[in-house]
Image: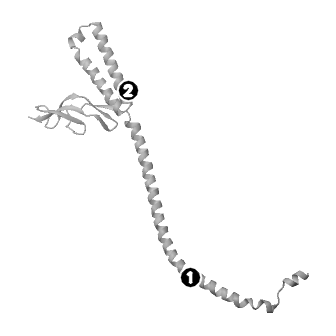
Amino acid sequence: MCDAKENEKSPEEVQPEAPEQAANDTSAADEMQEALDAGSKTYEELLEENAGLKDRLLRAMAEAENIRRRAAREKQEAAKFGISNFAKDLVDVADNLRRAMTSIPEDAQEAQIDAVKNLLLGIQMTDKELHTVLERHSVTVVHPEGEKFDPNFHQAIAEIPSETHEKGHVVDVVQTGYLIGDRVLRPAMVTVSKGK
């Protein structure tokens, strides 16, 4: 108990500290006012910085979304058109099979020669199977005889006069064209009518 009384201070002892504390309180108030004054400038700067950071964040998020969409589209196109080079090589094989079938004269086909008939039948079956496989992979034939010439799908190799076809229409298909999906794999090589 003695110790508690010793720690208690008399009113006379407390009073001399009061003017010092008042001076400290005044200087603290001045410092707080300065901080508030400085704080208002900093607050405006922080608002501007916050707006700038928000803008940058929104732009970064939009860019990330665009990259995600572009990657998804490229992935889809790669799956759809990834076999283009292989398909281009394969359509040349289809052309050779067609040439083999047309190179056998009709009189030889009708002569009932078993070897020729079997060979022709084998070539026809191979050609049919090849086109089935190509169609399974979205490769389709462009055979535009009689259609209006379209430079997006056809390649003109000659322009000839024709009484049966209108001007600008395909007269003959020299080489079959192919599409893969909606893209041209190989344009059809055609002759075009000049008209009469």
Q: Residue tagged by mark 1?
A: 34
Whole-angstrom CA distance, mark 1 to mark 2, is: 82 Å
Q: Quadrant of the C terminus?
A: top left
Label 1 vs 2, first from the N-terminus: 1
Q: Residue tagged by mark 2?
A: 133
What amino acid does circle 1 point to?
Answer: Glu
Q: Is residue 71 above or below residue 6?
A: above
What amino acid does circle 2 point to?
Answer: Val
Q: Residue shown at 13%/31% (left/top)?
A: 164
Q: Would residue 144 be seen by someone viewing this image from the given angle?
A: no
Q: Residue shown at 34%/32% (left/top)?
A: 85
Q: Which mark is residue 87?
A: none
For the residue pair 49 and 105, the one nearer the viewer reads as: 49
Q: Quadrant of the N terminus?
A: bottom right
Q: Is the C-beta separation of discs 1 and 2 under 8 Å?
A: no
Under tag 1, what secondary structure? helix
Q: Quadrant of residue 194?
A: top left
Q: Position of residue 53 (x, y in %)?
A: 48, 64
Q: Is residue 34 above or below residue 136?
A: below
Q: Position of residue 129 (x, y in %)?
A: 36, 22
Q: Residue shown at 48%/68% (left/top)?
A: 49
For the residue pair 111 and 22, the one nearer the viewer reads as: 22
Q: Is residue 160 left or right of residue 19?
A: left
Q: Is residue 16 left or right of residue 59?
A: right
Q: Position of residue 120 (x, y in %)?
A: 29, 14
Under tag 2, what secondary structure? helix
Q: Quadrant of residue 17?
A: bottom right
